[in-house]
Amino acid sequence: MGDVASVLYGVSIWALPLIFAVTLHEAAHGYAALAMGDDTAQRMGRISLNPLRHVDPFGTIILPAMLLIMGGVMFGWAKPVPVNFNKLRRPRLGMIVVAAAGPGMNLALAIIAVLTAVYILPHSPATIQEWLLLNLDNAIYFNLLLAMFNMIPIPPLDGGRVLVGILPRPLARRVAGLEKAGILILLAALFLLPILGRNLGMDLDIFQWLVQGPVESFGRFMVNLLR
């Protein structure tokens, strides 16, 4: 019985922060699209705080858990919120707003987690303080991770869509054309380059440079700033 409780405890401190981070990230895209004139997500029931509507069982739960256990890169995905960019008022600006809404939500959630840990956690019941602290610590990490990873300027990530909305049209069309190959480029950069680097005796861990390092540095900065 104790083993079961230990497993549930471990799962809860990782799964709960991740599910909330992913769910609210995707819901933010849907709310932003609706505010900018596209009701596609609303009609398909994707403007929802129900995690089951956004969670991809493999991409959101199984794959990240496997990578975490193996000590690898935290990587995964959720079901993308459908957006018809042609229906947005001022489509280029709308694309920027909708794309930035997800990472913006994750940044806001990370700030809320820091404030909760600093100002509310000390007044919570002692019996649950450790569990809450671990949840909040992981909430800060996962939300900053999602925000920074998704703002990498490569389609189909949110940062790529923001870049397409900002660039002059001829260049924007070229960048948008990378969308189908973008996920392959990311996978190669995240998984193949580090292996190649180890064989060559070089540090080619792009994830550490672009995401992991900045997440840790910015997390410490936020805690020091807000406490």
Image (cartoon, grey):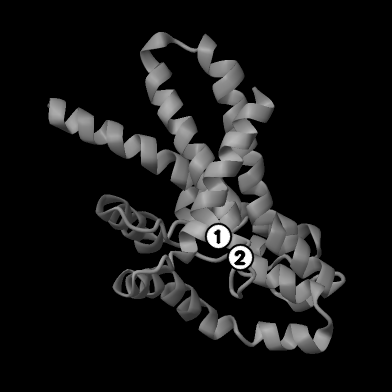
Q: What distance separates the C-alpha of mark 2 from that of mark 1?
A: 8 Å
Task: Give the x, y percent position of residue 163.
Answer: 73, 72
Task: Give the x, y percent position of residue 26.
Answer: 58, 56
Badge 2 vs badge 1, beta-carbon distance below 8 Å: yes
Q: Please give the label number shown on residue 210.
A: 1
Tell me, yes or no, if residue 45 can be seen here.
Answer: no
Q: In which quarter of the image is the N terminus?
A: top left
Based on the displayed image, in which of its 4 quarters is residue 118 positioned?
top right
Disc count in the image?
2
Q: Residue at x 22, y 35 (%)?
A: 7
Above or below, 152 against 85 in this view is: above
Closer to viewer: mark 2 or mark 1: 1
Q: Nearer the viewer, residue 1 or 122?
A: 122
Q: Which class describes the residues within 10 Å of circle 1: few (<14), some (14-19), or many (20+)?
A: few
Q: What element carries label 2?
A: loop
Above or below, 119 against 45 in this view is: above
Residue type at mark 1 is Leu
Q: Which residue is drawn at 64% across and 45% down?
A: 107
Q: In which quarter of the image is the C terminus?
A: top right
> Of label 2 and label 1, which has the lower sequence position?
2
Q: Residue at x 38, y 40 (%)?
A: 14
Based on the displayed image, in which of its 4 quarters is residue 165 positioned?
bottom right
